[in-house]
Amino acid sequence: MTTPRTDERLAPAPEGYRWPELHRLVSTCLHAGLPVLLRGHPGVGKSALAARLADDLGLPLIDIRLAQRDPADLCGVWFPDRDAAVLSVYPPRWAIAAAERPALIFLDEINAAVTKLHQAAAYQLVLERRVGELRLHPETLILAAGNLQDDEAIVTPLSSALNNRFVHFVLRPDAPAWVAWARDAGLHPVVVAYIERHGVDALYAPAEGEPAFPTPRAWEMLSRAMADADARDHRRLAAACVGVRAAERFYAWQRVFESVRVDRLIGRGETIDFQTGRGADPSFAYAVIHAVGAFLAEARSLSASEVANVVRFLRSPGLDPEYVFLCLRLVRRNADVFTQLRGLSSFRDLARDLVGLHPLVVERRA
């Protein structure tokens, strides 16, 4: 008898799933009406995933942070009904909303030091789909989230009965997915470039005796803080958001990134020799590509000479095709500039040289 072969691409991931995989898996479970419990490191993107799922499903998101709620906010307030000689319940407003129309209830921080009363309310909500006597709408969905037990966060184990009512997934830090999201969200190009260059080890690193440490949330905070800050304060802001150790590494990268004179490369047609000296350093080459790509992605339009200089730059001595593809991925975010490039015969010549290596640059018919 032959043992069935396991397809490794479909096998479970004990360390957790990347964002795109988890988005698909959780969506499937929610569509089936199954409650899901999502665990992951602090700041890794659990709340963002909940918001994305609610948007995809076309449902209002009811965000309930259990650790910050009194049990009465979850199960309602009891009051004596003297006429009926019984105790009745005033349900909370969120429960009324979830009973009147479909919604996605997000029980965040479900294992963050919640009491047995919190868990009892959550159990009634998940198992019986009701709050007191108030029944949830049949199409209301439930998603919960919590931290991992090995994180330096207070975690209260859930009862086996409550655990058994959930479909369980772990969200792991995912640098490519975060970079794609951050770029669409308009986060600071230096931060985005840094994470894309250094990967998941830079995106998330456990606390090393500091209150601030790198997480997807912390990098977003730094990006937003840098947007309107004086450049002299960037280093201090980085330390405050991601910790001193991570801030020093980021600041060293930022200095390289900001040393790139895009105005000379695109405005004057200067080139860099990526075969010798500083140009041969992969980190420097990556910084140059991101600086040029970020500039072109935001440019309104280019003059004829500037468009020609872009092609000249992409032909720089020793510039690896991988970096050319990366730069063009960034430029493609700007349809106007990319159209200008495609109108040049020199760019089409470049495309023909590269098209056998990668289909990104232009369609074969262009």
Image (cartoon, rainbow, N blue to C red):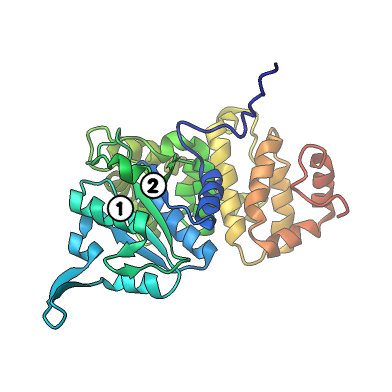
Residue ranking furthest to the right:
365
Q: Is residue 57 above or below residue 192?
A: below
The residue closer to the viewer here, 176 or 118, is 118
Element on which disc 2 rests:
loop
Instruction: State which tag comes first along the sequence, 1 or 2.
Output: 1
Q: Residues within 10 Å of mark 2 (few under 14, many from 20)?
A: some
The amino acid pointed to by label 1 is Tyr
Q: Which quadrant holds the C terminus?
A: bottom right
Position of 328 with respect to 185 (left or right) is right
Q: Between residues 109 and 256, which one lies in front from this camera angle?
A: 109
Q: Please state the horizontal and vertical placement of residue 185, each as a whole percent of the image.
A: 49, 59
Q: Is residue 42 visible?
A: no
Name the amino acid, label 2.
Answer: Arg
Mark 1, secondary structure of its residue: helix
Q: Residues within 10 Å of mark 1 (few under 14, many from 20)?
A: some
- 191 vs 289, left or right, is left
Residue visible at 67% across and 23% down in the picture: 4
For residue 109, above or below residue 84: above
Can you identify the residue that label 1 sits on? Answer: 123
Q: Mark on residue 165?
A: 2
For this orientation, the residue located farthest to the bottom is: 83
Q: How far across and down, in percent of the image, does residue 43 sit? A: 35, 47
- Disc 1, disc 2: CB below 8 Å? yes
Where in the figure is residue 45, as x and y percent of width and height? 41, 49
Could one spot residue 166 in this view of the protein? yes
Q: Which mark is residue 281?
A: none
328 shown above or below 96: above
Decide if residue 320 is on the left or right side of residue 198: right
